[in-house]
Image (cartoon, grey):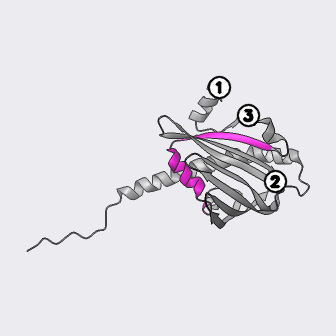
Amino acid sequence: MTKAADWQKLKEGKPIFLSTPAEALKSKPTETAAILVDSAPHEVWAVIADKEGAPKFIKGLKSAKVLKRGPGYELVEQKMTVGLIKVTYVLKDVSEPPDTVKFSRHSGDMKEIDGFWKFYPVDGGTKTLVVYRLGLKPGMGIPDLFVHSSLKTSLPEALRDVKGEVARRRAHNSESSKKPSVLKPLKSPK
């Protein structure tokens, strides 16, 4: 991803597609995309780590619920719409702080689903290059060509949704810190 044209698109706030290694493509349609976010990696991490809040900012994700937490992982049930089909599945999310969250199918309607989120600091850590890979095979007779086409649309949307949520939270936190304190003044001693 060293092409100047790719970096220009990223600097303009646009998502780009990256090449996906052949081994990731063997069993299912898989895409890899990236976007540049004007926030530090820990701020992006906080958004991705908000599993149950994700339906509020990721289009197509109807619900998300953490079913179990273990050392370094969470089992997360998600309900979403793939085309006209509603699916429910459980992902095993494995956190590798400070820069990677991997996920894979644990159970549910999807035949295969896996991928990752990776965060790379840019400009001294004031920005973050977010890379998102998603591979899925829903089964259910849905052709790979349809899934591949869907990924070409859904990955950039998800990246824009995450970028927007990071910006929204950053603005909210900035506004919250500007509000005057409601503490009562101390009485002076007599």
Give neighbour class at mark 3: few <14, some 14-19, many 20+ (Cα, 10 Å): few
Of circles 1 and 3, the one toward us is: 3
Of circles 2 and 1, the one toward us is: 2
What residue did someone put label 2 on? 112
| Viewer-nearest residue: 120 or 98 | 98
Q: Which mark is residue 180?
A: none
Q: Residue furthest front?
A: 71
What residue did someone put label 1 on? 3
Which corner quadrant of the image does residue 128 belong to? top right
Q: Residue furthest top?
A: 4
**x, y (%) of residue 22?**
80, 36
Q: Earlier in the sequence, mark 1 or mark 3?
A: 1
Judge from the rendering whether residue 141 lies leftward or rightward of residue 45; answer left or right.
right
Q: Is residue 7 above or below residue 68?
A: above
Q: Which residues are magenta?
A: 30-53
Q: Are marks 2 and 3 in contact (CB under 8 Å)?
A: no
**x, y (%) of residue 65?**
66, 66
Q: Quadrant of the N terminus?
A: top right
Kind of residue sitting beneath label 2? Glu
Kind of residue sitting beneath label 3? Ser
What residue did someone put label 3 on? 19
Helix, strand or loop at label 3? It is loop
